[in-house]
């Protein structure tokens, strides 16, 4: 079986505070709430799915007392958005006003973009570079 390269991608991770994460990714970055649910039963958790309606990916955040593991971001847990142009200072301002913290991500990413840690400490890189998976 061959996987269709247009298959949807889900990025999932735990969050300590879904409301804080929602402010960062919706008010700051401009993602949309695609779905939310509250875990009421045993083994269930709260869920927040964020993305752009026409994108082929979404970010799923889970929280609540039934989490198997709390958030434990490292400096290398990056969500990189390739903007193919300058990073708008107003966008960085919205991200920090929405609970993010601008951080240094090392010489490479500092040269090619801006890194902002979300309220859980996971890093969002807004890269000035262009990326394509197409060869040539």
Image (cartoon, rainbow, N blue to C red):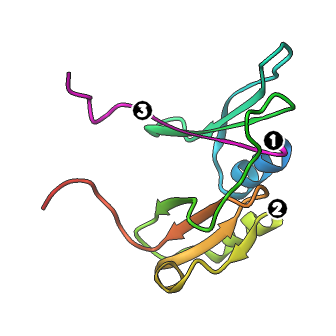
Q: Is 14 included in the stretch rendered in magenta?
A: yes
Look at mark 1 in the image and give the residue it sits on: 18
Residue 131 quadrant:
bottom left
Q: Residue at x 78, y 18 (%)?
A: 43
Cα separation, mark 3 vs mark 1, equals: 23 Å
Question: Quick check: 31 above or below 44?
Answer: below
Foreground of the two, 85 or 131: 131
Region rendered in magenta:
1-17
* Labels 2 and 3: the sequence-earlier one: 3
- In the displayed structure, would residue 124 be above or below residue 110? above
* In the displayed structure image, the side of residue 17 where residue 91 appears, left or right: left
In the shown orientation, is residue 127 left or right of residue 14? left
Q: Tell me: 39 left or right of 30.
A: right
Classify residue 40 by image quadrant: top right
Residue under pointer 2: 99
Q: CA distance from mark 2 to mark 1?
A: 12 Å
The numbered mark at residue 8 is 3
Q: Secondary structure under badge 2?
A: loop
Q: Along the polypeptide, which appears first: circle 2 or circle 1?
A: 1
Packing grade of label 2 (10 A; few <14, some 14-19, many >=20) is: many
């Amino acid at each position: 079986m061959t996987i269709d390269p247009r298959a949807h991608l889900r990025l999932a991770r735990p969050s300590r505070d879904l409301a804080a994460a929602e402010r960062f990714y919706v008010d700051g970055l401009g993602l949309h709430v695609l779905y939310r649910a509250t875990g009421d039963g045993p083994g269930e958790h709260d869920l927040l799915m964020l993305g752009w309606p026409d994108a082929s990916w979404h970010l799923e955040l889970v929280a609540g007392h039934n989490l198997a593991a709390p958030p434990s971001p490292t400096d290398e847990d990056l969500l990189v958005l390739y903007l193919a142009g300058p990073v708008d200072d107003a966008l960085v301002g919205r991200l920090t006003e929405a609970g993010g913290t601008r951080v240094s991500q090392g010489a490479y990413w500092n040269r090619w973009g801006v890194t902002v840690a979300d309220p859980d400490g996971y890093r969002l890189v807004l890269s000035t570079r262009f990326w394509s998976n197409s060869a040539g």
